[in-house]
Image: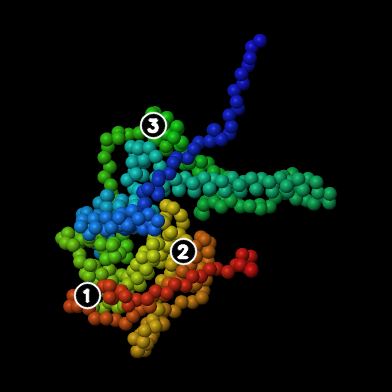
Amino acid sequence: MGVEFVAPAESEDSHKTPRPSRPNYNKLHAQPLPVKAHPLPPLIPHNPLSLLHIAFTYISHVAFPPSSHPQPLLRAYFSAETRSVHVTDETTARILWEKGFFGKGSLSRSEPAWLEREKIRQGLVLGDTSEEVTRRRREERKQFKNERARKEREAIEDKLAEEATDDPHGTDVSNGKGDVKLPTAIEVSQPSGTEGIDNQDPTSGLDQVSSDYTPLLGKDEQAVSASLGVTSGGSTLQDPAKVIINQEHLQLTVEEAFFLVYALGALEIHDPFDSQQITTSHLFSICRSHSYFPPQPTSSLAPNDPFLLSYVVYHHFRSLGWVVRPGIKFAVDYLLYNRGPVFSHAEFAVIILPSYNDAYWSSTADLQAMVQKKAKKSWWWLHCVNRVQAQVKKSLVVVYVEVPAPVSVDEKGDVVDIGRFLKRYRVRELMFKRWTPNRNRD
C-alpha cells in the first residue's frame, strides 16, 4: 500500500514580490550637523567610577583638544548670477546633505542624485533612485484612480440600464435606435486640446500609463536580471568601465551658506574668479546686497533687508534643532522638519513678516508710508495661505521679526561685529490652524 504525499499549498503571500530595501537613513544621517560634539560622559550617582571617567575625559580634552570641524574645511564658491553658493566637490556635497540636509542638487528635486539616475538610464548599474520610486508610485496611483473611475462608471451604467428595463411606467430613455441613452455620472479627465474627447474611452489613458510602468523588482529578480545583463527598466547593462562626468553641483541658499560659515565655521566660501576666500564680514554684506534685484550698494542697505529677515528666522529655528528647508512649493518661506525630509513630512510652514515697533520707523512720514506698505497684509491673504497648509496637513507659523533702527558701518560697508548686530533682532511666533465645523465643533 503506497503512501501519497501531498505538497502543502503555497500561500498568496509567497508570490508577492518584495520591495527593495531602503537605505539605512538612521546611519546615513546620524549627525544632525557637519560638526562633531565631544560631550563629557554622564554622571552616575551610585557609581563612583563615573567621576573618574569624567575627570579623565576632561583632562584628555584639555591636554589634547579634539577637532569638531572637518579638516580641511569644506569649500564652496559664491555665484552672483544665481545669488547662491555652489559646492562642486562631490564629497563636500555629500557631507552637507547627509549631515543636516543643506542645499539641493542643481539637476534634482532635492537630494543630488543626477549621477545615479544617469548611470541607471545608460544601463551601467542596477537599482532605482528615490525620484524614480516616487515617479513609479505616482503612476501606480494614477492607474488605480483611472481603474476605479471606470468601475464606478460601469456600475452606474448597469444600474441605470436595469432600471430602464424594469420601468413599469414605460419611460422612454432610448435615442430612437433601440439603444439606451444614459447620463454620464463620472467623467475621467483627458488632456486639454484633444479632438473628439467626448467619443474617447475614459480608460484610454491606462494603456499609456501601463506601457511606461516598470514594476519594482525584488532581490531575487534583480539577481536574475543582473545575471542576464538586464536592468530594472528592461535595458541591457553596458560596459561598467564607462566613466560619466558628474554635471551636478550642490546649490546652497545664502542663508544656509552664511549659517555654515558664521554659526558653525565649517565652510569656506571663495570668489569664483580669483579663488580668494571671502571673509565673514564681507560675505555678510554680499548676502545683504544680493538679496535685492538688481543688487544694491552697501551704502543703501537697510535693517529690513530680505536677507536679514530670512536669516534671523533661519538661524533661530536651526538653533532650536529643526531642519529648515525652503518652502516655495507650498507658498511659504520655510518648512520645518523634525529630523529631515527622508524621515517624515514637514510639520510646520513658516511665513516671515517684518514688525516695525521701534520709534525710528514712525519718525517721518516717508518711513510711516514704507512701513504701511511692507507690513500690511489682508485677511484674504492669510486665509489663502492657511487653507493651502491645511490641505497638506501642515501648521502655519507666522514669524514676526522686530526690525531695529539702522546702525553705522565701517568704511567698506561691512558690519564690524555681526553677533552684536544680529542680537538687536527679536523673533515672535504665532501659529494658526484652520477652523472647520465638522472637526473643531467642540
Name the N-terminal-most of marks 2 and 3. 3
Residue 191 located left or right of residue 32:
right
- Give percent across and percent down for residue 302: 30, 78
Name the N-terminal-most of marks 2 and 1. 2
Q: State the residue at coordinates (30%, 35%).
A: 240
Q: CA distance from mark 2 to mark 1?
A: 35 Å
Residue 431 located left or right of residue 63:
right
Residue that numbered label 1 is attached to: 416
- Give percent across and percent down for residue 305: 32, 74
Name the N-terminal-most of marks 3 and 1. 3
Q: CA distance from mark 2 to mark 3?
A: 43 Å
Residue that numbered label 3 is attached to: 226
Kind of residue sitting beneath label 1: Val
Kind of residue sitting beneath label 3: Ala
Kind of residue sitting beneath label 2: Phe
Neighbour class for label 1 at 10 Å: few (<14), some, many (≥20)?
Answer: some
Residue that numbered label 2 is attached to: 348
Neighbour class for label 3 at 10 Å: few (<14), some, many (≥20)?
Answer: some
Task: Kindly state the secondary structure of the residue where label 1 is placed.
Answer: loop
Q: State the residue at coordinates (30%, 52%).
A: 95
